[in-house]
Image (cartoon, rainbow, N blue to C red):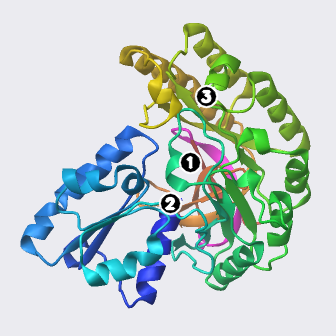
Amino acid sequence: MNLYDSGLIEAMLREAGGESVQSVVDADTILVNTCSVRAHAEQRALGRITSLGKLKCRNPDLKIGVVGCMAKRLGMRVIEVAPVVDFVVGPDNYRRLPDLIKNGRQVVLNEENGQEKYSECWSVHRRAPCAFIAIMRGCNNFCSYCVVPYLRGNERSRDHEDIKKEAEWLVRRGVKEVTLLGQNVSSYNDGRFDFPTLLKELCTIPGIGRIRFTTSHPKDVTSALLNTISSHSKLCNWLHLPVQSGSSRVLSRMNRGYSREEYLDLVTRARKSIPELSITTDIMVGFPGECEEDFSQTVDLVGKVRFDFAYMFMYSKREGTRAAEYQDIPMQVRKRRLRHIIDLQNRITKEQNGLLVGKVVEILIEGRCKRGNYDGYGKTKKNETVLFKGVSNIGDVVRVKVLGLSGWTPWGEIVND
């Protein structure tokens, strides 16, 4: 979403007469797009902003702006911590950036515009043959650990016709695969189209070969959605389903809206509906109140589901959330649990990828390899990255016979059949 929003901002500034440059040294204005999901992300952003102060010493006319979720959360505190900052703009006020840059005054715009969808404004961020499309903004779930609803606002879905126009615009620029974005894409509804209906509509666009989406909240993944994926060849057989914990008790404290049993039932139904389905997830360890039995249930669930890949992290306290009031688990316990779950999932990921050895897979070539003896890389419809040897062009769809693993990444040779 941040990559997409950076491209959205760039599109607005280009329309206002701006020009992007390759180096911060050549810039008249520098914008730092920030995230607040975890404390570490904010710390990195503040460090980056502070380092830009050296450039301002050399060029007093340089304008530095902070945008995104951290801008919304901290507001004036950003300028107090980093006085080099000229303006702070939350994620609902990007349309005002051209005027702020032009006027050059120090200002904070972090109030919420609950209706902003950025309709008819399309991100220029793309890496042909792939691109992102944001179909909705905000979240209504209020998981007890998550700050997103407070920063991104309530859920609001873009009009399906605007989304389709953006997809068609991307196709004209060489894009063959789109990934639909939202804090909770499976709850998309613009008043006329729900998410399965939107997917069916996008499948009618000539030139789009693949459609992915992320992220889906497990409680909103319906049978209609699973049936839509299984019956349309353009829809990739990959679901990102954040589980967060394998303990129903912890899931309830997280306000996730489903139990361990309901999640496992969803996985069973999804794999039954969609052939060769890949499932990836997010796993949080060390949530306040997580006891050893709760963690053991997470370990057990990971072993049962055998995710193809997982993003794994420790709980990070976020100011303003309900969980911020809970008693933290000691850091050494969180670190131990994180190491355990990482070791387990990494082993499973390698075993899952090892099943591809000897098989022929179809990949969309996304780029060239800068290191190693491989000519390029691409992804299967299951979201597996595959390295390959052979002559090809970026954007080609080719068949690759997998011959082995490099670490846990499959590699092979293009099959010219």
| For residue 28, side relative to residue 251 (left or right) | left
Residue range of the region highlighted in magenta in the rendering: 391-408
Q: Position of residue 351 (x, y in %)?
A: 65, 31
| For residue 278, side relative to residue 276 (left or right) | left
Residue 310 in view here: yes
Q: Amino acid at mark 2?
A: Glu
Q: Which residue matches tag 3?
A: 254
Q: Which residue matches tag 1?
A: 149
Residue in the picture at 11% in, 63% down:
54
| For residue 409, side relative to residue 417 (left or right) | left
Of mark 2 and mark 1, the one earlier in the sequence is 2
Task: For the N terminus, give its image quadrant.
Answer: bottom right
Of mark 2 and mark 3, the one earlier in the sequence is 2
Residue in the picture at 42% in, 77% down:
96
**Does 245 appear above or below 327?**
below
Residue in the picture at 58% in, 15% down:
295
In space, the residues marked 2 and 1 are separated at their CA atoms by 11 Å
**Label 3 crowd (10 A; few <14 / some 14-19 / many >=20):** many
Please tell me whether mark 2 or mark 3 is closer to you in this view. 2
Q: Position of residue 25 (x, y in %)?
A: 19, 74
Q: Amino acid at mark 3?
A: Met
Of mark 3 and mark 1, the one earlier in the sequence is 1
Please tell me whether mark 2 or mark 1 is closer to you in this view. 2
Q: Name the residue nearer the viewer: 100 or 409.
A: 100
Residue in the picture at 58% in, 57% down:
388
Q: Which residue matches tag 2?
A: 112
In space, the residues marked 3 and 1 are separated at their CA atoms by 14 Å
**Does 160 appear above or below 328?**
below
Residue 368 in view here: no
Q: Name the residue nearer the viewer: 371 or 41.
A: 41
Q: Are marks 2 and 3 in contact (CB under 8 Å)?
A: no
